[in-house]
Each structure stands twice: as structure tokens, then as C-alpha cells.
Image (cartoon, rainbow, N blue to C red):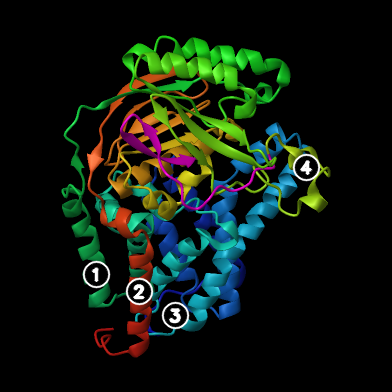
Amino acid sequence: MAHSASTPRPRAWSGDSLALVAGALVSLSLAPFELWLLGPLAAGLLAWLIADTPPAATARRGWLFGVGLFGAGTSWVYVSIHVYGHAAPWLAGLLTVLFCLGLGLLVALPAYIYARWLRPLPAGQWLGFAVFWVLTEWLRGWLLTGFPWLYLGYAHLDTPLAGWAPIAGVLGIGFVLALTGAVVAQWIRQRRAPRLALALTSLLWLAGPLLSWVEWTAPAPRAPLDIALVQANIPQELKWNPHYYRATLDAYDQLSRALWADSDIVIWPEAAIPGFYQQARDFLAQQARHAADHDATLILGIPWRDGEGVYYNSAVALGAGNGLYHKRRLVPFGEYVPLEHWLRGLIAFFDLPMSNFQSGPALQAPLMAGDVSLSVALCYEIVYPDLVAAGSGADLLLTLSNDAWFGHSIGPHQHFQMARMRALENGRWLVRATGSGVTGIVDHRGQVRASLPQFQTMVLHHQAEIRTGRTPFGLAGSLPLIAVCGVMWGGMASRRWMSDV
């Protein structure tokens, strides 16, 4: 609604520039910077910038916001392409820019929808903006295989909003932050905000700390598990060198020898062995005997080749445990190459080691360590909230990763932060083993109980608690929130309950 005292609108070029800056601010709210107040500030700035722009201009500013978001938050893509993909600096830079420009479109489309069909509704500029935000992040979780990275809510593991995670997940926290930013933006623009908007925003913030007191899950009536995580820190440039293969096996063998007697579970990271399981049978049989002799379980990530020549990125349990898991969500270009008939051979980046995997079945049993069940998420899979929630009935959450691809960048810290959110959402302890860090154990409230520094050869030995019961998010995932947003959209369209606006 127009108002004579409204704040002047920025010119087109300055507004576009501010949209780019607003997107970049989101990355500063996340790990490793942790300036969480910049998150709602960024959302509010975007809400102000697209409050009355035409749909096409709104889409453009949404796209620029996305470019700023991914340009600042996924700079580690350059490291992966240049340092480990052996692309020339100019080519790595070009591919990184194209990557960010393309991902920006995943914000532009919902922004257009917002301007065309949501913003004109009663409460559209604040409640509709929060619905738009959830729609944007939700779409990024599955459209074109999904890229659910840099969600706004990840910054709030240690803020009053953390209590919402076991109910509405990281997207629910994002809803509150977007609503907050939009209400503040409306206050600045109009010198006032609707009473309903202020009441709803205040209620959501005040409820967060109260919800944090709720114990959605309970300790199991058994002793905690003794877990040992092996961080061998094999340099990425040597990992797939066949001349270094034997040295890799020896490193894991030596680091694990002293662990069997004092551990229930010994865990090696994703692709710990740089070769197929079928090639390392003798070595793994030896390790399985060491584990079984002490009633312990060895869990490790290792590539798998079936009898038909199909390759999987997998995890296996040996010794006193059993089970096999094949990764379901693969990383484009890292684990498979889209349009590979055209791209294979063009540059070294399209021929990375083990970049021809197939996806595993949608439904897979957890790994077993004795009578303890572990739901597995390999590397990138841990960033998918609903994928992890589907397996949250297991005793523990387990994620294996090789974050050496990120190098000395912000990527590993973002990845670990997202893993922490999965523990909080599902009320389960989470165990994370990586080749070079960040390796750690996280409790059911998302708090880090123990971790290892990056790029050091070390072992983390710590206890982990088994929890029973399920959180609301663990049972239903993000669908209830999406349904609530749909109801809100319908309610705004009906105009029946918005007389306060």
C-alpha cells in the first residue's frame, strides 16, 4: 500500500547492485563467519528492493541476489575445479562464474512468481515474502537434482530460533527470518507495520527458546557407544595415485591398530580406500578379523563395483557389523558427468577419478554395528534435510565425507554446519568422519561434543549416545511446512482474514 511518508526507492542500477550485495551477506551469516544477524538483514534488504518492482525487474533482482549468494558462498567451487580438477585458472574462473549465474536462476523464477501472484495479495509484502522464501529454498532442494546449500536457517544452530528445527527444519527457520526481514522492511518503507505482522513475528521468536526446552527424543536404556573416527589426511593430489595405494592402506591399518580393543565402532571416511572393494578384499578381510576379535565394527567408505560393471560410491560395515549402502544423491561432475558423451575428454575436470558412479536404490537398510543401526549419508547427501529425515529412525546418524576437494576454503565449515543441523532436526547424535576434516561428533541438540582440526593426521575417540523416539521433523520432513505455506497463500488470496492489514 502506498504511503506519503514512504522511504524513497533506489534507482534501478543501485537497486540491482544492492540485490547482489544482499545475496553475498547471507554467506557471512553462515559458517565460518557466524554473523547471523546479517541473514535477516539480507532478507529484509531483498524484501525492500522488490517491494514494488514489476515482475521482470523483480526476477532480475532475485537472480542478482542468487548470484551474490552463490558467488560469495560457493567460492570453493573454483578450488575444486582448478586445484584438483587441473583446469587453468581462467577456465576454472569461467566455470565457477557460469555455475553461480545458473544457480541464480533458481531464485529468479520464484521471485517472478512472488511479484506476479503473491505480492499483490493482502499481506503479500510480508507474509507472502516469507512464503516466497520457503518456496525458493525448497525448490533448490530438488529441482534439477537439487543444490540445498546456503539455506538461511543454518546460521541459527545457537540462536533462539534453534528450537524450531526439530519441528519445521531449516526451512522453517528460514521462514521466520524472511518474515522478520520483510516486516522490518515494511516498517522502514511505510513507517509502520501491520499489527498482525508484528504479533506473528514476535510470537515465532519468543516460541523458539521455549521449544528448545522440549526433549523430543530420549536416551536409550543402554551405555553410550565408544566411537573412533580415523582422519588419515591423505593429500588429495596423492589419493588416487596408484603408486600411493599401498601407503594409504598402511596408514589406515596403523592408525586403527590401537583402536579395536577400546572401540565399539571404528569409522573411516568416504572413499577411504582409493580402489574398489572387490580389489581390496584381502586387506579388508584382515581388518574385519581385527574388529571381530574385539567384538567391534569397522565402517568405511569405499567404491563398489557389481558384477555387471556398475560403479557405486558406497559404505560397508565389517567385523561385528554388517550392511552395504550405495550413495543415492550424486554430485554432478564430481561423481557423474551430465551429457558425458559431449563433455568427457574436453578438459581434465570432466575426467576426475571415480566420476562414473550410479545412484543407489531409494530405499536401503541402515548399516548395523552389532545391534546398533546407523543411517548413512555420504558426503553431499547430508545437505538434503528430507533425505536424512527419512532415515532418522536409526540409532545414530552417520556421514562420511572427503572434504579435501574444498581445499583451504569455507566449504568444509559450511558442510559441517549443515551436518549439525541434521542432528538437531532429527534429535539424533551424528557421527562425521572425513579424510581431512572437519571430523566430529555432534549431539542431538546440534552441539559439537568433539572434533578434530583440519589437515592433521589424527584419531577422534569419543562416546556417542543412542536416542529413542522421533522429532516432528524426523517423522514428516518439510512437507507440513510446505502445506502450511500453501494454506497461507490460499488464505491471503481469500482476503477473509486480513482485515487487520
**Are the residues tagged 1 and 3 within 8 Å (C-beta)?**
no
The CA distance from mark 2 to mark 1 is: 10 Å
Three-letter amino acid code at the position of disc 2 = Leu
Kindly tell me whether residue 457 is visible in this rendering: no
**Are the residues tagged 2 and 3 within 8 Å (C-beta)?**
no
The CA distance from mark 1 to mark 3 is: 19 Å
Task: Give the residue at mark 2.
Answer: 127
Q: Residue 495, how many percent across, how many down?
A: 32, 89
Crowd around label 3: few <14 · some 14–19 · many ≥20 (10 Å):
many
**Are the residues tagged 2 and 1 within 8 Å (C-beta)?**
yes
Upstream in the sequence, badge 4 or badge 2? 4
| Label drawn at residue 103 | none
Upstream in the sequence, badge 4 or badge 1? 4
Task: Give the residue at mark 3.
Answer: 118
170 relative to 311, above or below: below
Q: Residue 213, how many percent across, how many down?
A: 16, 48
Task: Give the residue at mark 1.
Answer: 200
Q: Residue 222, how many percent across, how many down?
A: 19, 30
Upstream in the sequence, badge 1 or badge 3? 3
Q: Residue 297, how many percent across, how many down?
A: 39, 24
Three-letter amino acid code at the position of disc 3 = Leu
213 relative to 450, above or below: below
- Segment tinted magenta in the rendering: 355-378
